[in-house]
Image: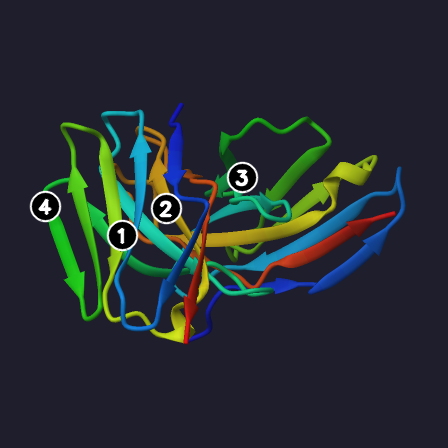
Amino acid sequence: DAGVTQSPTHLIKTRGQQVTLRCSPKSGHDTVSWYQQALGQGPQFIFQYYEEEERQRGNFPDRFSGHQFPNYSSELNVNALLLGDSALYLCASSLGLTSSLGEQFFGPGTRLTVL
Amino acid sequence: GENVEQHPSTLSVQEGDSAVIKCTYSDSASNYFPWYKQELGKRPQLIIDIRSNVGEKKDQRIAVTLNKTAKHFSLHITETQPEDSAVYFCAAPSGSARQLTFGSGTQLTVLP
């Protein structure tokens, strides 16, 4: 039973570039959430995908966009990278959109460094 | 939206002592409160969670208590060991959404 996987593990980009991060949810999960974790801080919610649609969005600019595929995997895209986008990007998977929130399982993260 | 405050930001205890970390939340509709442990360079891992229909939950050396009236919940670790050293995060959901709002984290250091 595979857990949440993310790729790549590390990435170095320069300001103004674009980046795509990938996530495969835990087997049996259909909902993917993305979080940004700056050094020394707690994860900050970016957005959530369910049934290939963005369902919830945190306080992040439109430079952050995403996609979910029919197999439930997801991508996070960030355009026009800024130095402040340097962080650990975490993907979390869960099951369904019910009123009873269940466990969210985190992937290992992608460490993005913007120079 | 939900606002979660976590205290203390750092905590040092002697091996074998207990550690307590406290969080408060703002959204009275929140009904699920997880605690995550994050070791350096690793992913957050769920260590215990509690739902709003119970006041306390235990799992071996760790326990979580919830006071819905006061809107706060706490993590208790007994008989601490050096391997308990990590950053601990509390979290709460935002109303009907499945997004989690995290506290700012507590760096726990267990001194041998």
Quickly name the residue at label 3: A44
Left or right of B19 on screen, residue B83: right
Q: Residue at x 25, y 71 (%)?
A: B79
Quickly name the residue at label 1: B75
Q: Residue at x 31, y 70 (%)?
A: B80
Quadrant of residue B92 in the image? top left
| Mark 4 surroundings within 10 Å by alpha-carbon count, few (fewer than 14), some (14 through 19), many (20 or more) | few
Find the distance from the CA under tag 3 to the CA under tag 4. 27 Å
Query: Which dot, 2 or 1, sits closer to the camera?
Result: 1
The reply to whether callout 2 and callout 3 are in contact (CB within 8 Å) is no
Secondary structure category for the residue under label 3 = strand
- Label 1 in the same subunit as label 3: no
Quickly name the residue at label 2: B90
Secondary structure category for the residue under label 4 = loop
Residue toward you, B27 or A51? B27
Quickly name the residue at label 4: B54
Find the distance from the CA under tag 2 to the CA under tag 1. 8 Å
Left or right of A94 on screen, residue B24: left
| Mark 3 surroundings within 10 Å by alpha-carbon count, few (fewer than 14), some (14 through 19), many (20 or more) | many
Q: Is residue B94 visible?
A: yes
Q: Horizontal and vertical percent for residue B61? A: 22, 69
Find the distance from the CA under tag 4 to the CA under tag 2. 17 Å
- Label 3 in the same subunit as label 4: no
- Name the subunit of mark 4: B
Q: Horizontal and vertical percent for residue B108? A: 43, 58
Find the distance from the CA under tag 1 to the CA under tag 3. 21 Å
Secondary structure category for the residue under label 1 = strand
- Label 2 in the same subunit as label 3: no
Q: Horizontal and vertical percent for residue A22? A: 65, 56
